[in-house]
Amino acid sequence: MPVVYDDRHHGHDPTVEVQCGVPIAMFEAPARADAIRDALLEDPAFELTSSRSHGAAPVTKVHDEGMVRFLQSAWGEWERSGGIPGSPRSEELIPDTVLHPALREGMGPAREPTGITGRIGFWCWETMTGLVAGSFDAACAAVDVALSAADLTLSGRPITYALTRPPGHHSPRAAFGGYCLFNFASIAAAYLRDQSEGRVAILDVDYHHGNGTQQIFYQTDAVLYVSLHADPARAYPYFAGWADEVGSGIGSDWNRNYPLPAACDDEQYLATLDEALALVAGRNPELLVVSLGLDTYARDPIADFNVTTDAFFEVGKRVAALDLPMLVVQEGGYCVEDLGNNVRQWLLGALSVSAAPVRAH
Ligand code: OKP
Ligand code: ZN
């Protein structure tokens, strides 16, 4: 199986995330992708492949151009600005003000401010996604990883793995956050959709709901979004992921959420997965994009499910049994010690089933 990877993810390396005022060492760190790369490299079932550039157009098909411009210019502007008067310069940029929808209720949309401190609160929706000097280049490199992997899917490879970092599924069209910069799975899904005939389905198995991906495709029937995740009543990202969010307009019925309780075990997880897979199969997509998070793992430090490594093999196997050409895009998973093996088991499970090549058209 091809594993598309680019070392430039190392450039995105913020030190802390702020949770309810508490600065905590970043869970989302370069060691995650390194651990996955190392675990796959030592297994002959996987071959490491480099990416090629696809330019900015596939990104701006999904994300607001202003957001892309912001991420490109943010660090330089922060460097040139005076910083916070009277305070030492931080090593990363996190907003102190975030555009809350109630702030401008009844007054029309907000305008983008001109200064860096206002701009970051205009484009970022939370406080756990610090920007550093190399963040934008790392995000662009990961876009090319996802798109180069998508090219392999289009050329007929049954299963391709994009080793992207940071994750992407929390970034909607016009904002970023939740450790995420660009939404790589969405960018790849939109790209695949443009280059193929039929529908694309996205199956998101990260512990957290992919609020960004849901938002991007909420009003279209061209891309089906299906997610299994921790119930937003108790878990991040809190404001999306409810079972009654089913899409709107022509997208009605093309979004499906399966919120799950704390301590969800293999049996409950696999039973819910079967429901989700039956739904995907019933919609006859041509291609499948998987948002692969391994933070459903029992030992994950930021999550509360009890899913085991053996179950990851089984999940991969059941997803591949859909018999659809499949692009797997890496999202979360924070038990770095076991992350490489968990990804490997998931992908080996998928490989244990023979998948169909892309239908000719
Ligand atoms: C990114 B991905 C809440 C902490 C939440 C951010 C989690 C981002 C997860 N107190 N921290 O979906 O794995
Ligand atoms: Zn997650």
Image: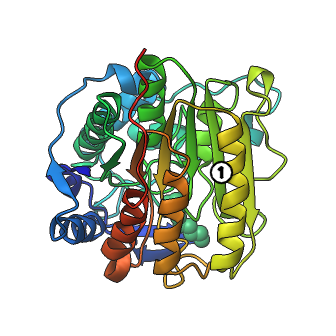
Q: Amino acid at mark 1?
A: Leu
Q: Position of residue 173 (x, y in %)?
A: 54, 32
Q: Is residue 212 above or below residue 89?
A: above
Point out the residue furthest to the front here.
354
Q: Is residue 33 above or below residue 76?
A: below
> Which residue is pictured at 52% across the width and 38% down the height?
175
> Which residue is pictured at 68% across the width and 77% down the height?
267
Quarter of the rendering occupied by the C terminus: top left
Categorize mark 1 by other alpha carbons within 10 Å: few (<14), some (14-19), many (20+): some
Q: Is residue 64 above or below residue 316?
A: above
> Which residue is pictured at 32% across the width and 82% down the height?
337
Q: Which residue lies under the disc numbered 1? A: 277
Q: Is residue 360 above or below residue 101?
A: above
Disc 1, SS = helix
- Observer able to see residue 20: no
Question: How is this picture coloured?
Answer: rainbow
Mark 1 near ligand 2 (CB under 8 Å)?
no
Q: Looking at the picture, tell me which residue is in the foreground, 166 or 52.
A: 52
Q: Quadrant of residue 283?
A: top right
Q: Quadrant of residue 75?
A: top left
- Observer able to see residue 155: yes
Q: Position of residue 160 (x, y in %)?
A: 32, 46
Q: Quadrant of residue 303?
A: bottom right
| 229 sits left or right of 309 in the view | right
Count of all numbered marks drawn on residues in the image = 1
| 91 sits left or right of 18 in the view | left
Q: Position of residue 31 (x, y in %)?
A: 25, 70
Q: Position of residue 162 (x, y in %)?
A: 32, 48
> Which residue is pictured at 44% across the width and 44% down the height?
117
